[in-house]
Amino acid sequence: MASIGIDTFFAPLPQLNASLKAREFSAEDLARAFSERLRQLGPRYNALALPLLQEALRQAKEVDKDLKRQRFRGPLQGIPYGVKDLLALAGQPTTWGAKPYAGQVFDYTATVIQKLSDVGAVLAGKLSMVELAGGGGYRFPSASLTGPGLNPWDRTRWAGGSSSGSAAAVAAGLLPFAIGSETSGSIVTPASFCGVTALRPTYGLVSRHGAMALSWTLDKLGPFARSAEDCGLILHEIAGKDSKDPGSAGKSFYYTPQYARSMKDLRVGYAPADFAEWVEPATRPTFEAAIGVLKASGMQLVETKLPEFPYAAVLSTILAGEMGSIFEPLIASGKVEELADKPQIAGLKASLELPAKDYLKAMRLRRLIQEEAGKLFGSVDVLLAPGRAGIAPKIDQPIDRSRGGAPPKDPGFRSIIPMGNLAGLPALVLPCGFAGNMPVALQVVGVPFSENTLLAIGREFQSRTDWHKRRPPGA
Amino acid sequence: MKLTRRKLATVLVSATAVAAQQPAPTPAPAPDDNLKAARDRLQANARALATTTIPMDTEPAFQFKA
């Protein structure tokens, strides 16, 4: 077996693929190295739900045969990866991070896994998550079958949720990339807390066939990776029409960095209150420096306000209505009591009592929100906000802890996560520095199907900074 | 039916004994605080939704496409 050094575990996808083509190491060598690292270090972060070493080696051997015959299938060929344990893999356990489903096995495979397999990517393991993606309203990081997701930058802190394992595994160099999901914040939050680049695609761009449903009209799948460039390469392969997903937008995505708009043409909407008042004081210098980098690249930063709506209430009501219907059998059977988090159990039970009129009212308001979001993007190209207002909380703290003191009067983009998810907007998370030893990140949000613009901004930012290349201590 | 004093005393003693065997009525279970909080959140959300006027011709976004 060829020697694979520590730098390989943090290498970008094009470099790994080039090394495979140049026979510096084989796909089998790479799969074995990452799988062993994932098996050994994954439990250190409670990031591993299911190792798939033998399956990975079998796939990798097929890739090596293809490479030997010069059958090239794209930049992900031979690259190991992981998926959040809410994606079905035929014949293997899919727990949804929850005890009542610990023995669940499907006889089919999620479209996104199939697509990645078709281009030669090698599935090395399934990754931990907050139970049932946290839809019931969990209060503590311990709300998971595998225990609280631990942050590779400081294991006394949370990795974020609900795609905890996907973010932690990429941050710690256990995998080159991973797939996670977002209903409202489950990609943006763990990516921000763990300091990795991640993309929440436009609703409907990536098939959810084979994924646990939490909310049919909100759920999305997206990549966690080392850079915006890597996210673009991954999205290129996993996006596309799927008749098995009723929410599929029927569109493909072609990653086209060569056609990126000039940064000088981009108008970036932002709210100064977000960075001056809402974020934790320790993070402010980092955010100020990051905004300086964007300005230096020529982007025009424009003060902007979000349209006034009760975003969080609209999202919570829609989520409760759909989640209650989806998990009614779990709740009715009483097995809901086996979940780890008491507020989550209560939230699921209460969801069955949601009046239909409230769900419909929320869905009507959602239409107005989509219309107003469209108007907002008439004056700016993208929106810029902190990924999260602070660093990752301690694992024994409630995740909804108060920021303390009176909230600022200007709401800024405080609701950008529910607003973006209600309107189906894509978002890119970019690590932008540290507060103490913990990562801090920006999020850039665009109109539906503007992923190439977001990725161009990400590439520009990452060409001027190296925050996305930093490695956690001991990794 | 004629009820003698002896029969009346027997009935009363028996009834008391049966009553004594019944478990003391337990206080109603305390409401689940988490469930109450979850219900309160649903109601707070409903109140928040009511703050926005929705034109009659606004249909639900149930055929959601981005």
Image (tube, rainbow, N blue to C red):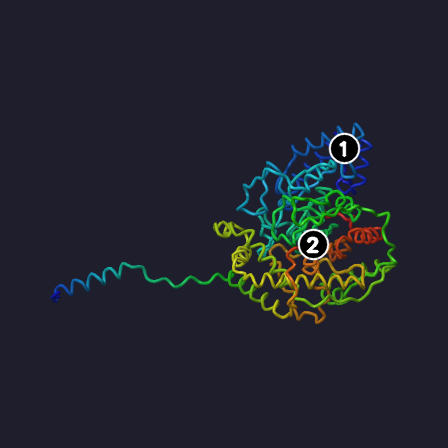
Identified at 79% across, 59% down, the residue is: A382
Q: Nearer the viewer, residue A189 or A158?
A: A189
Q: Specify the subunit that label 1 lies on.
A: A
Q: Nearer the viewer, residue A154 or A238?
A: A238
Direction from residue B29 to residue A177 in the image, left or right: right
Identified at 24% across, 59% down, the residue is: B18
Q: Nearer the viewer, residue A372 or A162?
A: A372
Q: Does label 2 lie on the same chain as label 1? A: no
Q: Whole-percent x and y of residue A11?
A: 78, 42
Quarter assignment of residue B21: bottom left
Direction from residue A174 to residue A461 in the image, left or right: right
Residue on which disc 2 sits: B65
Q: Whole-percent x and y of residue A428?
A: 75, 53
* Tag 1 secondary structure: loop
Residue on which disc 1 sits: A3
Q: Whole-percent x and y of residue B60?
A: 64, 60
Name which residue type carries label 2: Lys
**Res A442 seen here:** no
Q: Nearer the viewer, residue A453 or A438?
A: A453
The span from disc 1 to disc 2 (Cα, nearest Å) is 48 Å
* Tag 2 secondary structure: loop
B33 w.r.t. A429: above or below: below
